[in-house]
Image (cartoon, rainbow, N blue to C red):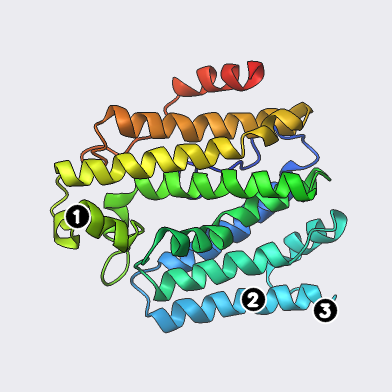
Amino acid sequence: MSVDHYENFPVASLLLPARLRPAVTAIYAFARSADDFADEGGLPAAERLRRLAAYRAELDRIGRDEPATHPLFQRLAGHIAAHALPLAPFYDLLEAFEQDVVKDRYASYDELLDYCRRSANPIGRLLLHLFDAATAENLQHSDKICSALQLVNHWQDVGIDLDKGPRGRIYLPQDEMARFGVSEEMLRCRLASAEFRALMGFQVERARALMMSGAALGRSLSGRIGMEIRAIIAGGLAILDKIEAAGCDVFRRRPLLGAMDWPRLFLKAAFA
């Protein structure tokens, strides 16, 4: 697990077979560096989009069976070929990062889920392809888990996201903020009001339900990938529990998984 970006996703963890770790590391390097471009708040939006467009051009070269020019993509191309990885998830990730440059508010939960479809679900899909387990049912369950993990990340980072971009990013759906009586001004005060706690409690419960709706994937897949998925689910659920335990006040202390959490989570995954 990474402690910076994609912290709720597998990144060459010990549960992954050694033969797959280089591929997962290459995928992570692509996603993390592209995400960094999107988050370079000190650069003009046009420059950030230009850098992402250069990544898109490298993917286009791979798609045309032309040599990549960037070292990152030269490594990635070998893994894409070796494992017959589809390019669509990589393009989806780039589209999500481009969206982060130009969009900082979400009108509804459905709109936010569409963002998760491109910002999170591709990681799980690529992992299933690496394990030759990308059946329609598995992909559907994976999408639910990954979208839930992305939501978990948003809810633990409500305060941090307010500092990203010219206006700050708010992933809380605008219509639900209005329904619970939470304004942007209230968020910027970083006070966990009763209204904010109610809104966050609702988001936590929905993310938990979405996660559990895909949890069958961890039980249906055997071996290391099954345990990896069960550990990821346990980690995401643990963060939701920490948000609730803090009274949904994610402003004063960001809920994180510590060193003492992981042995318990891996044991839970092993016997789930």
Sequence-wise first label, 2 or 3: 2
Residue beneath label 1, please? Answer: 182
Identity of the amino acid at label 1? Val
Q: Is residue 219 left or right of residue 80?
A: left
The disc, 1 or 3, on the residue closer to the chain's N-terminal end is: 3
Q: Which mark is residue 56?
A: 2
Q: CA distance from mark 2 to mark 3?
A: 12 Å
Q: Nearer the viewer, mark 1 or mark 3?
A: 1
| Mark 3, other Cα within 10 Å: few <14 / some 14–19 / many ≥20 | few
Q: Which mark is residue 206?
A: none
Disc 2 on helix, strand or loop?
Answer: helix
Q: Is residue 92 visible?
A: yes
Q: Of the two numbered discs 2 and 1 on the same chain, state the one appearing first in sequence.
A: 2
- As helix, strand or loop, the secondary structure at mark 1 comes to loop
Q: Pointer 2: residues within 10 angstroms few (<14), some, or many (20+)?
A: some
Give coordinates of residue 42: x percent, y percent.
33, 72
In the image: residue 97, left or right of residue 217: left
